[in-house]
Amino acid sequence: MKFKQMALAAVIAGGFVGLGQAATDGSVGDSSNGNFDINLNIPGNVGIWGLRDLGFTTTSAQSQTVKACVFSSTENVQFQVVNNTDFELRDGGTKGADFTVTITENGASGGSIWGDSGLSTGDTSPKNYNVTDASLPADISTAVCTGNDQTIDIVVGITPVASPANGTYTSNVELVVSAI
């Protein structure tokens, strides 16, 4: 009985292995030809460093800029900004300010990468960022940016609500950099 169960399991598993593949079996005859594809996918490596926390201490609109570095083993990357508070600074459930995030490249082509096109949380940048001059330093925790093509500015602007109550209003932004 165990042999029959194992044989049935092997037949079922063998049937699933071939799903979605382009392999073709040969026909029975004097000779038989079949073929199969071999694929090697080497994903790109990316890294971002130089980020820091920002603090604001006024009830007027203002902005701060963080200069950060990007590395990629591919020619281009894309950015995605994720925020779970709808770009609001909050103290518990109380809104203290709206904020914006804009990512701008400092390379030869310049211009905005993320934030000027009405993007929402989780949206991917409509523009690819070229990092052809980038090289990965041995230790990114102590590294400095070395090329214009790997330096970005992350600009965070806040607009407090009218007469916000005393408190500490916070939010977290996740910056996702993906090799393309």
Image: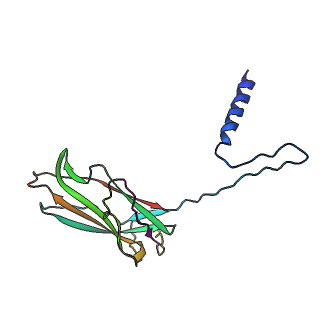
- Residue sitting at x 41%, y 72%: 150
Q: Position of residue 174 (x, y in %)?
A: 35, 55
Q: Quadrant of residue 140?
A: bottom left
- Residue sitting at x 69%, y 37%: 15
The image shows residue 106, relative to residue 39, as above or below, that is below
- Residue sitting at x 79%, y 49%: 34
Check the picture and name the quadrant holding the N terminus. top right
The residue at the far top in this view is 1
The residue at the far right in this view is 30
Q: Can residue 36 be seen in this view?
A: yes
Q: Position of residue 161 (x, y in %)?
A: 13, 55
Residue placed most toward the observer, 47 or 178: 178
Residue placed most toward the observer, 148 or 87: 87
Q: Give the range drawn in magenta.
A: 122-131
Q: Where is residue 81 in the image (x, y as percent from the top left)?
A: 35, 57
Count numbered badges in the picture.
0
Q: Quadrant of residue 177?
A: bottom left
- Does the magenta stretch mainly form a helix, a strand or a loop? loop
- Residue sitting at x 38%, y 65%: 49
Q: In which quarter of the image is residue 77?
A: bottom left
State left or right for residue 142 relative to residue 27: left
State left or right for residue 100 relative to residue 179: left
Q: Where is residue 92 in the image (x, y as percent from the top left)?
A: 19, 45
121 magenta-colored: no
The residue at the far bottom in this view is 108
